Amino acid sequence: MEQEQVQGKLYDGQLLRRLAVYLKPYRKQVAATVALLTVHSLLESVGPILTSIAVDRYLVQRAPGAWDGIAQLSLIMLGVAVLMLLAEFGQALLMQWTGQQAMFALRRDLMAKLHQLDIAYFDKHPVGRLVTRVTGDVDTLNELFSSGLVAILGDAIMLTWLLGVLLWMSPGLTALILIVTPAIYWATMLFRAQVSASYRRIRLAVARINAFLNEHINGISVLQAFNREQAARDEFAEINREHMLAFKQS
C-alpha cells in the first residue's frame, strides 16, 4: 500500500520524461508520425472550406455552370478524403510499430530488474502486484503510445491550425471564444485530478485481486487442509466489491 501511495505522488511530467527514453531510439518514426498528423489535420480543414465555396459561389448565387463547379469540388473532396485516409493509416502504422518496440524494451528492462532483486523483496511484495505492474501497467502504457499520444498530438495540431484560421478570419470573434479558455482549463484540471485518483484506486484493486488469486491458487492445498474455503470466498468478495466500487466512482 505504501509503495502505491508513493508512486501516486510522482508528477506526470517526470514520468513522461522517464518514458521518453524508450522512444528516443525511434526519433525518425516519431517525427514521421507528427508530420503525417500535421498533414491529416490540414486536410481535415479543407472539407469545410470546399463546402463553404460550394454554398456561397454555386448554390446561393446560382451561377451558370453551378453543377459543374459542384462536381469539380466533389472530386477534390474525394481526393482529399483519400489523402486523409492514407495519412491516417501511415501514422497509425508507424505509431503502433514504435509503441510495440518501446514496450518490448520496457518489458525486457522490467524482467531484468526482477531477476536482480533479492529473495527478500518477493517475500514483502505479493507476486500478483508485480504481475500487474509487468503486464497490466505496461499494456496501459502501450495504449498511451499507440493511440493516446496520437490523439493528443492530433488534437493539439488541429487546435493550433483552427486558432490561426479563426484569427485570420475574425480576430474579434476569436477573442470572444478565448474568453472561456480559463474556465475550460480549470474544469479540465479538476476532472484530471478526480480521474487520476480513480485510476489509482482501480490499479490498486486490480493488484490486490491478482495478489489474492496468486496466493490462494498456489496455496489451495493448505487452504483446503485448514477448511478456509468460505473465509477465502468472503475475503475475495470484499476485494472484488472494492474493485467494482472503484470503477463506479470513475
Image (spheres, helix red, strand yellow):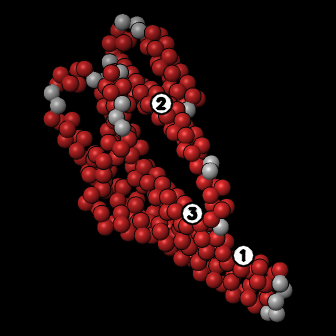
Instruction: Tell me residue 39's x, y (percent).
Output: 49, 72
Residue that label 1 marks: 52
In this view, 72 is above or below 170: below
Q: Quadrant of the N terminus?
A: top left
Measured in 3D between alpha carbons, the distance from the residue under mark 2 to the one under mark 1, in whole angstroms, is 45 Å
Q: Foreground residue, 24 or 17?
A: 17
Residue 202 visible here: no
Residue sitting at x 77%, y 78%: 55
Residue that label 3 marks: 163
Q: Mark 2 or mark 3, which is nearer to you?
A: 3
Residue sitting at x 75%, y 90%: 68
Q: Could you say which disc has been placed on residue 116 in the image? A: none
The single residue placed furthest to the top in the displayed view is 226
| Labelled pair 2, 1 in contact (Cβ < 8 Å) | no
10 Å crowding of disc 2: few (<14), some (14-19), many (20+): some
Name the N-terminal-most of marks 1 and 3: 1
